[in-house]
Image: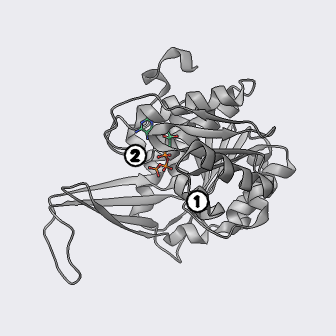
Amino acid sequence: MAVVVVGSLITDIISYVERLPQPGETIRGKSLFIGCGGKGANQCVAAAKLGAECTMIGKLGSDSFSEMHETSFKSLGINFEHVSRTDEAFTGVAQILVEETGQNSIVIVPGANDKLGAENVRKAVALIKEACVVVAQLEVNIEASVEALKLAFTNEVKIIFNAAPAASNLPSEVYQLSSVFCVNESEAEMLTGEKVDSIESADRSAQILQERGCKVVLITLGSRGAYLKDEANNGILIAAPPVKAVDTTGAGDSFIGALAYYMAYYPKLPLQTMVERSCQVAAFSVQKPGTQISFPTKEELPEELF
Ligand code: ATP
């Protein structure tokens, strides 16, 4: 198995409205979209769409939303045998209201994602041992993510740790055990207290993370690209290609999924090249609306990326 993702599966329920309701107010929406999301699931789908052989480790409720995730994953050939179901909570849901101005309000109920335990990750130890890359984030019970880090590290498997959504207090293992520690600007600020608004501040933030034990640090900077600080402490800004973005939702997940793909299938490429290519893939995704649906397949991308 090339890529193992330990992470969240969330059903996005998006209502498009003229304006957001006031407290206590009921309004009529214009249209509805229900789709599969969650950082873990998005990253897994992003890697699978590029052609990676992937396994997902996660937790769903025993409800009809869970079936949508299963159908979608299986259609992409993703190994789903380590996505278990619980009767103790519903499948994670993000209720999203989007008004005409583009302004939104979001409520995420993690539900079953919080029930993913270390024991669920241990059950997949054989797959983790033979994986090229393990990917984990912070949208499931932290014990599951830390177990993934420990198992990958002990078995000398590369791990991309995406410290998202933003959190302030993380256990020391997440810094010390990850091969690549990846955050966006606001997550970097939350962790380090350093406002990331320039190359210098990105470097300072990355430096703080390295002092906590991180090896490679990657800070994604939206349309500006990504700042890479390698194990030798060399920092470089990798520019994103200029494109006309229509929807940047999930750009970070597209980037991480692509990076996992390159680390698994092109391990001899310099890290900088892998990051450049991941920026190209993510730039592709922002030119289409939606999240998983906007992630490009190998066939849609220029040959020089492979
Ligand atoms: P999200 O939370 O929406 O998934 P994020 O905040 O985690 O995103 P970003 O830093 O916004 O992540 O974007 C990740 C990567 O996607 C960037 O490093 C960049 O390569 C690419 N990207 C994002 N926005 C743009 C854009 N407007 N044009 C080109 N590339 C972009």
Q: What element carries label 1?
A: helix
- Residue 152 seen in render: yes
Q: Which residue lies furthest to the top in this view?
A: 303
Amino acid type at image mark 1: Glu
Which residue is at the front of the view, 52 or 30?
30
Q: Between 75 and 306, which is closer to the camera in this rendering?
A: 306
Instruction: Indicate which label's residue lies in the foreground, 1 or 2.
Output: 1
Label at residue 189? 1
| 138 to 231, vertically: above or below | below
Residue 102 image position (x, y, % from top left):
25, 54
Closest to the observer, 165 or 267: 165
| Element on which disc 2 rests | loop
Instruction: Classify mark 1: residues with Cα within 10 Å, few (<14), some (14-19) or many (20+).
Output: many
Quadrant in which the N terminus appears: top right
The residue sitting at 58% across, 28% down in the picture is 276
Q: In this view, does 173 lie to the left or right of 238?
A: right
Is residue 83 at least partly visible in the picture? no
Question: Does ligand 1 reach within 8 Å of label 2's beta carbon?
Answer: yes
Q: Relative to residue 152, is residue 275 depicted above or below?
A: above
The residue beneath circle 2 is 291
Disc 2 crowd, CA 10 A, few/some/many (<14, 14-19, 20+): many
